[in-house]
Amino acid sequence: MTDTTETNMRELALKLLSTFHLSVPERKSVPPNGIPFSMLVDAVESQISNGGWFPAPLNDTAPAIGEGARIEVRNGNIWLHEQHEIGMGRYSDIVSRRVSSMRDAVTDFVRANGGAPIDSVSIDWSH
């Protein structure tokens, strides 16, 4: 991949994981096998280096996740925080667990948010 292609793919990966959607023109630039998993990991690592959370932090103004997960890096440890709907408009408590690597965190993040493909965009898990 050229540097421009790699940068574009990282931006698409970040958008896909942040919004769970890509536009039709964006989808056309995704390789036939899907977005490389390594690009998803790189995109999350880059985002977390700017604030410690992906996609957004939990705090006093946003104390709940709703449906899905968040990734946090705190004191050099990677945490996955997960919450799911358990009834009409009711959510479970947030369950937090430490994961061993960013690859594991992104894998679990994708799973917690509905799995792959994401918005019909495949993930190339082998790359």
Image (cartoon, helix red, strand yellow):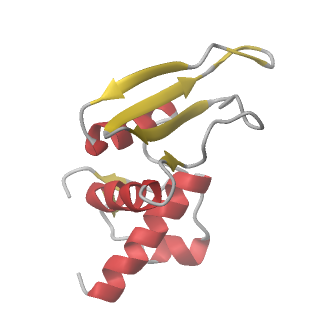
The picture places residue 52, in percent across and down from the top left corner, at 47, 48
Residue in the picture at 48% in, 60% down: 50
Q: Is residue 49 above or below residue 97?
A: below
- Picture quadrant of residue 67: top right
Quarter of the picture holding the C terminus: bottom left
Q: Is residue 127 visible?
A: yes
- Estimate the x, y position of residue 94 in percent, counting from the top left: 58, 19
Name the residue rendered at 41%, 55% in the picture.
44
Rendered location of residue 120, percent (x, y): 51, 53
Q: Is residue 30 left or right of residue 59?
A: left
Left or right: where 42 falls relative to 90: left
Up the image or down, 106 lies above or below 36; here it is above
11 or 52, nearer to the observer: 52
Inspect this view and state whether residue 110 appears: no
Horizontal arrangement in the rendering, residue 88 relative to residue 31 (left or right)? right
Q: Residue at x 57, y 54 (%)?
A: 18
50, above or below 69, in the image: below
The quarter of the image holding the N terminus is bottom left
